[in-house]
Amino acid sequence: MTSPPQGATASTGPPVADGPSPPAEPGATTRPPVRPGLIWAALVVVYVLWGSTYLGIRVAVESLPALTSAALRFAAAAVVLALILRIRRKAGALRVDRRQLGSAALVGVLLLAGGNGLVVLAEAGPPGSAVPSGVAALLVATVPLLVVLLRAATGDRPRFWTFAGVSLGFLGLVLLVLPTGGSAAVPVAGALTVVAAAASWSVGSFLSNRLPMPADPFVATVYEMLAGAMALAVLAAVRGELRDFDPGQVTGRSWLALAYLMVAGSLVAFTAYVWLLHHAPISLVSTYAYVNPVVAVALGALLAAEPVTASVLLGGAVIVAGVAVVVSTERPRRPSGAAGRAPRR
């Protein structure tokens, strides 16, 4: 997963780190108009690349240790993004105070070590217990719903239709993991691992709107990815992944998948997303929250022969419908902080 910048998806709920409010709808500023073709091209990039990262994770962990692969991915992406910022901007582009650094580090650990790391572990499970990439994406799609619950628990009062969307989404989650014909369509342990990842991502998204984060979302992302990579490396060492790790045994297929995750998921799609936040209506940009899971399921079926059962289709459709209700209800009212952020793929 790759999380959006600070505050970027605050109203949709998931991954995508949060901070400054997204720009107002077009027309509220003097920014020159952008051709619709460019906006839709950027949307397709976000739809396809972020939707494809779940399959990329599955391929990467075929021969790479799970948490090690995630640590390498985010460390490399952070270094590249930091170099770009340093080259294109002044020398102090990455300067933040201690509180901002601490907040970004905490959010990064929750989003990447907890959110992304657990998804990677779920997809890297042994045969029979690994979660298919498409199903993982559907389960992660519950993040906007979890963030709504966090808001309600802290005194906020979401709209009736927001709660209706949350209820619908969790009904879809039950349908997705409910045993049919004597066996579960999705490994229960793996599904619970992904749900735990979604919960960690939700907490990180929720806190990122309430902590003193760096004002620049790109700068915040650098520190989030560095902190997440460090935490993932420590966890990988604790799990013993580094003890017997031999880079020579990693297949070219897995290295290519890791490179794809670094470049396509963490840099290209992220940049397209930030550009969209400044040039397109937030209600349109937020559609990635329920398009990405559809893309992930389709790619998993077409490229990895992942089974798409009736339970997956029904549960997935209900989850996506619930997320769509939450997104469409929340966006018009408070575009800068309603329901959370989307997972950082």
Image (spheres, helix red, strand yellow):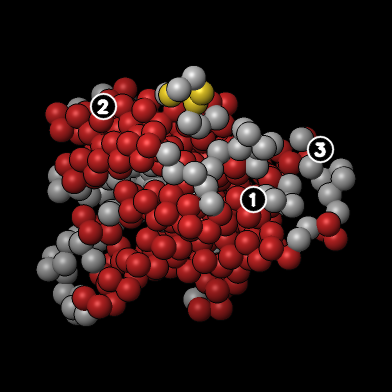
The residue under label 3 is which amino acid type? Gly
Q: Which mark is on residue 167? A: 2
* Pointer 2 local density, CA inside 10 Å: few below 14, some 14–19, many at least 20: some
The residue under label 1 is which amino acid type? Ala
Mark closer to the observer (3, 2): 2
Q: Which mark is on residue 240? A: 3
C-alpha span from label 3 to label 2: 40 Å
Q: Which mark is on residue 70? A: 1
Residue at x 50% of width, y 79% of height: 88
Classify residue 288 by image quadrant. Answer: bottom left
Q: Earlier in the sequence, mark 1 or mark 3?
A: 1
Residue at x 32% of width, y 49% of height: 290
Q: Position of residue 322 (x, y in %)?
A: 26, 37
Q: Dots 3 and 2: beta carbons under 8 Å?
A: no
The residue under label 2 is which amino acid type? Ser
User: In this rendering, would 276 be left or right of 272?
Assistant: left
User: In this rendering, would 267 be left or right of 254?
Assistant: left
Q: Earlier in the sequence, mark 1 or mark 2?
A: 1
Mark closer to the observer (1, 2): 2
Asked whether residue 221 is in view, the answer is no
